[in-house]
Image (cartoon, coloured by chain):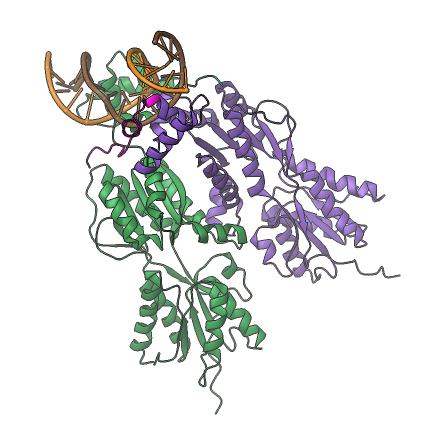
Chain colours: A green, B purple, C orange, D brown
DNA sequence: CTGAAAGCGCTAACAC
DNA sequence: GTGTTAGCGCTTTCAG
């Protein structure tokens, strides 16, 4: 393999335009202090020669790498990919993140890291040393991991914490989990439900608790009790099944359930069916995430739709703005989730007297 | 933002180990001609300091970038992401490609390019100039695009053509489309079907034709006619519906259909249902791809399972081997697809006399 | 087998 | 406004 070099470099452009390297560099980076006519001349040469700066060289000379790293949990991501259930969290991040990056000449690189490993630090430092990214996108459960956020802050790397509301370094962004849970619960209340159960997600995830709070708030606002209606889960199918079993076995049973994930909602749906309960006739069901398994379920699930692409795009934009020295907002950014009403929710059966 | 530099560089390692930069470089790159004890000493310093080479610098100095570019069709990919139907082609490529890259210290970068654009060349050259990848993964319909393959060959960049059987530069890999179609058809023949229709995919894709050939071969081997049983499609839902309408309207109607994509199979399933035909009672159905919509259909679809992750991993391995100067195989690499038998196929109804 | 020199393509800092 | 100089961290020569 022959030694591969850049076909056309800044030097060629400079020669063609009859200016110094520095001037070309200024044009590329849209820096001020270049006369418009000069800029036009250089731009013409760039277009003519088809010049594109080497990001490796840009990183070597300057301080930017034009690389943004998206960190996801290794085990969960690989499990999702392997199971082929259609979970499209990664795709949605790519959709929002890649396209936004492309608009600004950045690239998004995906990276998997172990959550519960004692060498997260090593792994992360390795990725940072290798790529020297200009920014990092953190997803739950990494978003609130102080080892990770501390390290990034210390390195002076911009980062966004998706699914976090904490103060501190980095941008916090959420999809309005509390509001989404409230929306789901209010929908059920409006249909006439009074006994509405809630299956929580993994307690390692801050958003699990916010969703519980949204449900609690909606119930309280309607004057409804929540005493025995909260069941623990971990987002996974098996935990959903157990939680549903408990809620359906209550002396005064639920007529509706909100589940913090599609998997848990599906588990509930299948349990209901096995028990001879019809959905939504005997039991209404709302799920979180709206991945394909919720949409293709029978009946199709009423679900909270997470705007993952949108929130990722926002996170990328914040990082790029910060890198460009532009002003960035202070508080958390909320891109609210919405509710897609489908066939799994209906009014409860009239009480039998 | 302070100018960010590498925390620990090759220089620190060299100082710590008391050797020259060059020796450290040799150890990093596992080059020969280093005494084992020397190597051990340097490795110890690397581990101690947590040194990781900067890939930007590696690219600047040498000829490798440790980056592999995965090129996908922009329109189709964005459409899949936006529709949220669970198509996991990208995820499977990531699963196979990222993990294999990681094993060898490479990174996979996704890139979308327009197929039918007249400036593919510009777009591709831009990506190459910016990233200087060590290899490129081509997916259909780019795999056989001479503009793309020619350009890569000319640049001396290793590349893999997934879904291509053509000779020429770059590694050709397929999932044995012809064999897969034969497998599907033979499954139906073994169940007793005689009138087996086939809905082809987009003619822009070479694999569409191979699948037709597999079906034709299996039919011929069983002494069955295929005259009016082939319908054109383009992988999309609407085209599947049209094709199915034609096949179901035949004077001597089909009792089974093989569709070249899940979307087209689903369209067929829904059309059959609308016509009051039961699947698999009145019509057996086999789909290609086995994305979640096939698996979650009612009944669950018998489907050809494409080993996308596996073929991507193989492609990456070939590229890395070639870059390392290792021997690589000549002919096309085939990672055969398999058939998942589910509820959409059954023996045909006994003929009514 | 190991070391010293030169340079990859670009930008920061400073002159002009 | 624009040009000049000196690196960034690494690998490739080429000496020893």
Farthest bottom residue in view? A353
Query: Which picture quadrant has residue B37?
Result: top left
Residue B7 point in image, percent of width and height: 26, 34
- How many marks the image carries: the answer is 0
Q: Is residue C1 above or below residue B340?
A: above
Say above or below: B149 vs A239: above
* Left or right of B94, for residue A122: left
- Outermost residue, right direction? B353
Q: Nearer the viewer, residue B342 or B141?
A: B342
| Vertical relation: C10 (above or below) B298 | above
Identify the image quadrant of residue B15.
Answer: top left
Please report the residue visible at 81 percent of the width from the left and 50 percent of the height from the top: B194
> Where residue B341 sits: x, y (%)?
69, 54
**Of residues B46 and A28, which is closer to you in this image?**
B46
Range shown magenta:
B1-22
> Could you tell me if residue A131 is visible in this image?
no
**Relative depth, front residue between A228 and A31:** A228
Residue B1 lies, in percent from the top left, at 20, 37
| Foreground of the two, A40 or A268 | A268
Does residue D2 sit above or below B161 in this rendering? Answer: above
Residue sticking out furthest to the front:
B37
Q: Position of residue A30 (x, y in %)?
A: 24, 28
Left-right relation of B310 to A255: right
Residue B327 in view, yes or no: yes
Q: Is residue B304 magenta?
A: no
């Amino acid at each position: 393999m022959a030694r591969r070099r850049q076909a056309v470099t800044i030097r060629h452009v400079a020669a063609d335009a009859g200016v110094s390297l520095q001037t070309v560099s200024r044009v590329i980076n849209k820096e001020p202090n270049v006369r418009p006519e000069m800029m036009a001349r250089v731009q013409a040469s760039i277009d003519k020669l088809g010049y594109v700066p080497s990001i490796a060289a840009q990183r070597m000379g300057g301080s930017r790498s034009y690389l943004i790293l998206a960190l996801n949990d290794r085990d969960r991501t690989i499990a999702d990919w392997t199971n082929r259930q259609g979970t499209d969290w990664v795709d949605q991040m790519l959709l929002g993140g890649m396209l936004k990056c492309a608009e600004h000449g950045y690239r998004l690189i995906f990276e998997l890291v172990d959550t519960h490993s004692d060498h997260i630090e090593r792994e992360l430092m390795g990725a940072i040393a290798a790529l020297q990214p200009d920014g990092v996108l953190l997803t739950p459960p990494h978003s609130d991991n102080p080892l990770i956020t501390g390290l990034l802050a210390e390195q002076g790397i911009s980062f966004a914490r998706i699914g976090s509301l904490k103060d501190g370094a980095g941008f916090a962004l959420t999809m309005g989990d509390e509001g989404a849970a409230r929306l789901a619960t209010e929908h059920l209340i409006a249909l006439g439900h009074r006994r509405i159960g809630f299956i929580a997600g993994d307690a390692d995830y801050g958003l699990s608790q916010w969703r519980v709070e949204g449900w609690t708030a909606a119930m309280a606002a309607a004057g409804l009790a929540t005493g025995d209606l909260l069941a623990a889960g971990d987002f996974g199918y098996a935990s959903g099944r157990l939680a549903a079993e408990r809620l359906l076995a209550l002396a005064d049973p639920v007529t509706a359930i909100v589940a913090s994930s599609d998997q848990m909602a599906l588990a509930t749906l299948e349990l209901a069916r096995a028990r001879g309960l019809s959905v939504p006739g005997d039991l209404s069901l709302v799920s979180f995430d709206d991945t394909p398994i919720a949409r293709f379920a029978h009946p199709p699930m009423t679900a909270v739709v997470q705007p993952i692409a949108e929130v990722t795009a926002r996170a990328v934009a914040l990082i790029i703005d910060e890198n460009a020295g532009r002003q960035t907002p202070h508080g958390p950014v909320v891109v609210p989730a919405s509710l897609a009403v489908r066939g799994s929710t209906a009014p409860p059966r009239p009480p039998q007297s």
